[in-house]
Amino acid sequence: MAFRLRDFRPEDLERVIYINRTCLPENYSSYFFMSVHKNFPDLFLVAEEDGEIVGYIMCRVERGFLHRWSGKAPKGHVISIAVLPEHRRKGIATALLKEALARMSERYGAGECYLEVRVSNTPAISLYRKLGFEETKVVPHYYLDGEDAYIMTKVLERDNP
Ligand code: COA
């Protein structure tokens, strides 16, 4: 494996924003990236190859308002994942996602993980299916350009996330 994963650090911000803008139409402010990092520092990971960041995953864990009383486990949410085009199909997204899922389950007690994906995004849908996600819902016109989203969900098992 020529790449390695590590936690995002504030000095990575510019490079992560570059990767986000290169790969996805859904872009976020610096403030948003940094607030996810502040709240869930171990769920924002980067992949490095030869000392250069080539991909990232940014996730959070959501606890419903009634979570404590209902006994429902928190949910992991993949907010954004991207790998630069020239570094794709080498297992980088798989490694990022697997590590984030394991951390959500082990460190935050997440019982499931969900994400949104464009219905036309075949590469990402294939990746998620391969890791055990299933399409559970369609959200019409979810994206700004009017495209629908699938909500894809995976149950996280404590010993086998
Ligand atoms: N076509 C079909 N299946 C694909 C694919 C493609 N272009 N790219 C990945 N997959 C599927 C395959 O099943 C692949 O396994 P295989 O290579 O053994 O066939 C599996 O996903 C794992 O691929 P992996 O190498 O781990 O993914 P990656 O590092 O290339 O990154 C994305 C995948 C989706 C993150 C990358 O294509 C990307 O950054 N796309 C743009 C941003 C994006 O769409 N993010 C998701 C938003 S919801």
Image (cartoon, rainbow, N blue to C red):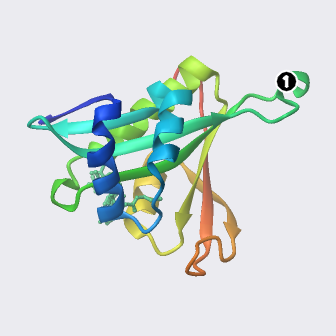
122 in relation to 67, above or below: below
> Which residue is at the far bottom?
146
Which residue is outermost to the right? 69
Q: Which residue is denoted by mark 1 in the rendering?
A: 71
Q: Quadrant of the N terminus?
A: top left
Task: Tell me where residue 85 appears, x and y as whole percent.
Answer: 21, 61
* Residue under the image location 20 percent in, 37 percent down: 48
Local SS, label 1: loop
Q: Estimate the x, y position of residue 8 in percent, counting from the top left.
A: 35, 32
Residue 132 in view of the camera: no
Left or right side of 91 for 94: right
Q: Quadrant of ligand 1?
A: bottom left
Classify 10 Å Cα crowding around label 1: few (below 14), some (14-19), many (20 and above): few
| Along the viewing direction, whichever of 34 and 44 lies nearer the viewer | 34
Nearer-the-camera pick, 73 or 22: 22
Observer able to see residue 68: yes
> In x, y percent, where is residue 117?
53, 62
Instruction: Tell me where residue 122 sits by quadrant.
Output: bottom left
For the point 20% across and 48% down, which residue is it? 90
Where does residue 138 sit, x and y in percent of width and height?
A: 68, 68
Residue for point 64% across, 28% down = 110
Q: Which residue is at 34% across, 44% downward?
A: 56
Q: Left or right of 45: which side holds 78?
A: right
Question: Height in image: 46 above or below 123?
Answer: above
Quarter of the image for residue 151 reads bottom right
Q: Is residue 25 above or below residue 101?
A: below
